[in-house]
Image: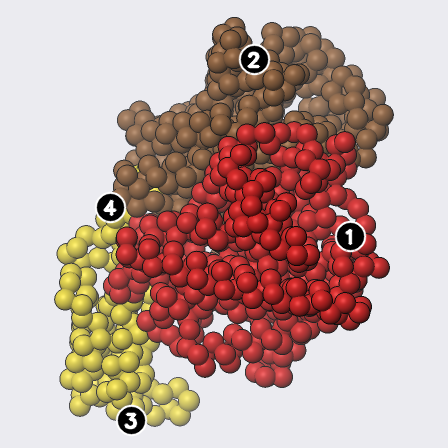
Chain colours: A yellow, B red, C brown
Amino acid sequence: MKLVIAIIQPHKLDDVKKELYQEEVNLITVSEVLGHGRQKGVTEVYRGIKETGNLLRKIRLEIAVNDNFLERTIKAITKGARTGETGDGKIFVLDLSECVRIRTGETGPEAIG
Amino acid sequence: MINAGDTAFVLIASAMVLLMTPGLAFFYGGMVRRKNVLGVLMQCFIIMCVLGLQWVLFGYSLSFAPGNAFIGSLDWAGLRGVGLEPYADYAATIPHQAFMIFQAMFAVITPALIIGAFAERMKFSAFLVFTLLWAFFVYDPIAHMVWGTGGLFRNLGVLDFAGGTVVHINAGVAALVTALYLGKRKHFPQAVAPHNLPFTVLGAGLLWFGWFGFNAGSALAANGIAVNAFVVTNTAAAAAGLTWALIDWLHNGKPTMFGTVTGAVAGLVAITPAAGFVGVIPAVLIGVGVSIICFLMVTVVKMKFGYDDSLDAFGVHGIGGIFGALATGLFASKALNPAGADGLFNGNPKLFLIQLGAVLFTLVYSLIATFVILKIVDKLIGVRVNEKDEAIGLDLTQHKETAYTVLE
Amino acid sequence: MINAGDTAFVLIASAMVLLMTPGLAFFYGGMVRRKNILGVLMQCFIIMCVLGLQWVLFGYSLSFAPGNAFIGSLDWAGLRGVGLEPYAGYAATIPHQAFMIFQAMFAVITPALIIGAFAERMKFSAFLVFTLLWAFLVYDPITHMVWGNGGLLKSMGVQDFAGGIVVHVNAGIAALVAALYLGKRRHFPQAVAPHNLPFTVLGAGLLWFGWFGFNAGSALAANGIAVNAFVVTNTAGAAAGLTWALIDWLYNGKPTMFGTITGAIAGLAAITPAAGFVGVIPAILIGISVSLIGFFMVAIVKFKFSYDDSLDAFGVHGIGGIIGVLATGLFASKALNPAGVDGLFNGNPKFFLIQLGAVLFTVVYSLAGTFVILKIVDKLMGVRVNEKDEAIGLDLTQHKETAYTVLE
């Protein structure tokens, strides 16, 4: 079992979701986060003052998958989120030691699907 | 002779109509996605600035100064000769400038209504040029024809108490043209959930409040006609809001907040041309009727024909305005307002035909002129933002700002 | 003789000016970080309460009752002798109390303007004491000198139609002093992004609306002068808003929402002293110049001299007020308002010098008065919250509340 964490551009969320559904990955958690990588934030203007280095809005996805789904999940996120410019984001893959479905008490790979 | 009561009334009414534009900004602004809210607010607010200047410099003269049947002259440009004495042809008991500034607020809100059609995808620079040209070539001529002395429709006996034709049909048709010209947003027909529905409700509340200035103020005196307009305005809005809520309940299982405010605004639109000429029972009928028709337009027709009138500027204002102008031709009563005319139901079918003719003319005129203006602006600077900017949102790409912070 | 039209006008205008203080609360509240918004809203709202009482008990008497050249007597304390008959010395056609309550709204909003300078860092208790002392020792005397019968500046021929000196210069200078006295916020000069820019836009819309009551209402009758004031108010606000947007566009590449409303408010502030004495063309010039100078002040001078006028109370209101008072000295026209005077451009340079003198006097008085009061309050209880409370935010540390929930 793996936990896939992806940081993507907010406006690519719809595209990523579409790709994930096509790969039959239907269980995701989405949160709004702030951060920046190499591009060092965005420039905004407030009453004539340029503000550089503001943290950028990003979307964080968390997807728990069984091992056989890992590759297509990564493929779907990459395909949906890529624009080719700086700021497209990152995907992290972590080992997942346990998963419990609260309603039934099922554990392990059963619980993920 | 200046009457203090009338002057007080028209000035306060003018302030109330001014407040409708920020109200509209929030009404629309709540409906868009959070990345585009400033885009909408900015378009509304800059119109208050640009049209506020255009009107005193040229617009008032082109609309109301003596001219031909289609447009006024430039004799009153820069308010030359528009002073603090009454000008009896328009309003005999208030300073001429009071009438001018009351009308200014109408010139401001009319192009602001169109914003609903091209929300979330128009370039700000193109929007500015479009709006200014539209004021000169569509609003001012139509205002002159309907309300100006010597204007074509005024001479034909068209009744438009507070701007059904001039404001709502005019802007509504322009909205349809713009929505078609700019094309759909990327995700259409998938609906966009309003990012802040309470803002939309706040906007609707401010609009309802300001509409009393709009309609009752159009009597241009604190008299019985103003009172009648006030009463039927409230009644029609109430009837339309309730009707929409009930349709929602039947059609979707629950009455919605969004539907109720949409209905109320449609009711306010529809009663606008009729406010000085009909009583409360017609007002109730107009309110019920407009909600039924507008509901069909924004839920069924829009999807069927696939035009992305994003915030339903055409579906609510255009359709509501047409319905109201025609309803005036049906229900108008000379018994109620001796300065008006009798409608079809009071034995005068001719008025209905006149109203119908004015609707058709305005429709065709606004349609063609809006299209030509868009075409010109498109050639000059391009009207639509590119796909990436649309995805990122207008706030950041057009104004380098974001509406809300996430932390702190 | 009481005139119903005039009385209706002044009463509604009073209500509109009252609404400006909640409007200002949102205007400022949207600009601060979310941990401080209740701090700002609370300061504005409590002023409505505290000054609302101070005014009827003492303030009105100190400002307007017969006294010496500097301050009124306490003869009218608790509204003793201030009844429902007109007092011709101030307004001959409305009840004396109508004049009093109209003025009350000015006494409320003036100290509220100062809040912008010390936002996000002043102790609430110190703020309360400061505000009350400021009302007694700065606002009431300046009001008496400018508007009270027998007042020093009034006797010299100073003209301040709706409060450019009394309200904007006065509060603007106090703001500068307070910003300097309290010192910078921790992160200055790094700018704080407004946590809710739509709130700021809402506030600006309400302010623009209320300003018609403020300026047109200052005619104290629904007459031609009121109409003129209304027209130039709208025009100056529009010209200034558009100008700021264009400067933004040139200077930063995009026109911003925040800049546009800042400009509009600066324009409204600048036209305030002139509203009853100038026509539309001077209004446009005043609007353009206040945005040029205001932009320079808040985007460049503030950082060069490094004073943390957090929400630009000085940069917008102080500067706007000063420009407006001086512009009145240039553009005032007796042809427009026979009760006024001619300015420099109408052949009367003396009047410009009088206005200049009044500005200098007010600057010095407000500066010294505000500084002494801050010093006293600081000795008594300390004016600034400690560093930890500033970091946590005023909402939680000063009011034990938070503005927004995170969940549900």
**Residue B120, image quadrant:** bottom left
> Residue at position x 31%, y 60% from top?
B384
Residue A47 in percent (x, y) is at 36, 39
Name the mark on residue A110: 3
Q: C306 or C341, which lies in front?
A: C341
Callout 4 amino acid:
Thr
Q: Is residue B37 above or below residue B17?
A: below
| Residue located beneath label 2 in the image | C342
Marks 3/2: CA–CA distance: 89 Å
Residue C149 in percent (x, y) is at 70, 13
Q: In the picture provided, is A78 more to the left or to the right than C118?
A: left
Q: Residues within 10 Å of mark 1 (few under 14, many from 20)?
A: few
From the viewer's perspective, is the residue at label 3 or at label 4 nearer? Answer: 4
Q: Are marks 3 and 1 on the same chain?
A: no
Marks 3 and 2 close (CB-CB < 8 Å): no
Q: In the picture provided, is B54 more to the left or to the right than A87?
A: right
Q: B355 or C66, which lies in front?
A: B355
Name the mark on residue B339: 1
What secondary structure is found at the residue carrying circle 4? strand
Residue B107 in percent (x, y) is at 54, 48
